[in-house]
Image (cartoon, rainbow, N blue to C red):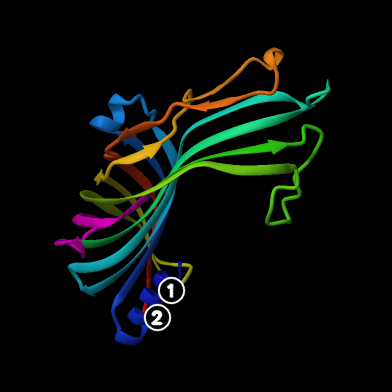
Amino acid sequence: MQIINVLLFISIVSGGVFQGSLGLIGQFPKGEFKEQGVPTGFGINGSGIFYLNPCVGLGLNIGYGQYGRSSRQIPFNYFSDLITIEEKTTNSIGGGHFFFRIKPFNKTKIQPYTEGLVGLKHLTTTTGLYNNNCTDDSETSYDDCEIASSTNASDIVFSYGFGVGIDVLLGQNFNESGDLYFFINTRYLYGGEAKYLKQGDIEFSDPADGPVITTFNWSESATDLLQISFGLLFDFDN
């Protein structure tokens, strides 16, 4: 987020235009990634963009989505099943991309654009243990119900692609600060080969046979995604 703050500062001192956006995303696996059985992911993303001139901008996009989640009840310890806790496993894809955007029509209410992107994808699988009889305090920055957690898989790969989208003007001089837009865009993001886990790739031995043994059935492939995003964009009035 420090880079987005820098873009905002540059736009103020240079008299350029800075835009910030926040939206929801759908991540649709393509190619080898889809063939491995990776499901569609959903999440959020945010962008900051500085326009060098009315038609050309440079920006940063950061996103996070989950492509699978599972949970099970397990005994608190090996000697008794009278007390259980919840085990949650989450598969996710995060990433950041610098992008170059061309918006040829910037004075109309509907503004189409095209862009090129380059950055990184981060695939992770994490598992946590949680107290069933607990209420998380929303005022704390951590999960009060979490007992322990671990990262089972983590891989970072190179990512690049292209996209198209439109910004639709909703209101001018919104809150006397700038213009408010609705945006929707589609991006195809090629991704390097990663080693990862998806839902169903973690297997457990029968507790009746002794201490539980966990088996990871790793998947490995390219990580191409079709990403669709929509949300709100704010054009700061300098």
Judge whether 123 appears above or below 160 on screen: above
89 relative to 171 in the view: left or right: right
For label 2, the residue is 9
Q: Tell whether label 1 touches label 2 (CB within 8 Å).
A: yes
144 relative to 162 in the view: left or right: right
Q: Picture coordinates of residue 172 (x, y %)?
A: 37, 65
In depth, the one of 26 and 32 nearer the eye is 32
Magenta stretch: dominant secondary structure:
strand
Q: Outermost residue toward the front?
A: 210
For label 1, the residue is 5
Q: Secondary structure at mark 1?
A: helix
C-alpha distance separating marks 2 and 1: 6 Å
In depth, the one of 92 and 40 nearer the eye is 92
Judge whether 223 appears above or below 216 on screen: below
- Quadrant containing the C terminus in the rendered view: bottom left
- Pointer 1 local density, CA inside 10 Å: few below 14, some 14–19, many at least 20: few
Residue at image location 70% in from the left, 30% down from the top: 86
184 relative to 23 in the view: left or right: left
- Write down the quadrant of residue 43 in the picture: top left
- Quadrant containing the N terminus in the rendered view: bottom left
The range drawn in magenta is 101-121
- Write down the quadrant of residue 29 in the picture: top left
Q: Secondary structure at mark 2?
A: helix
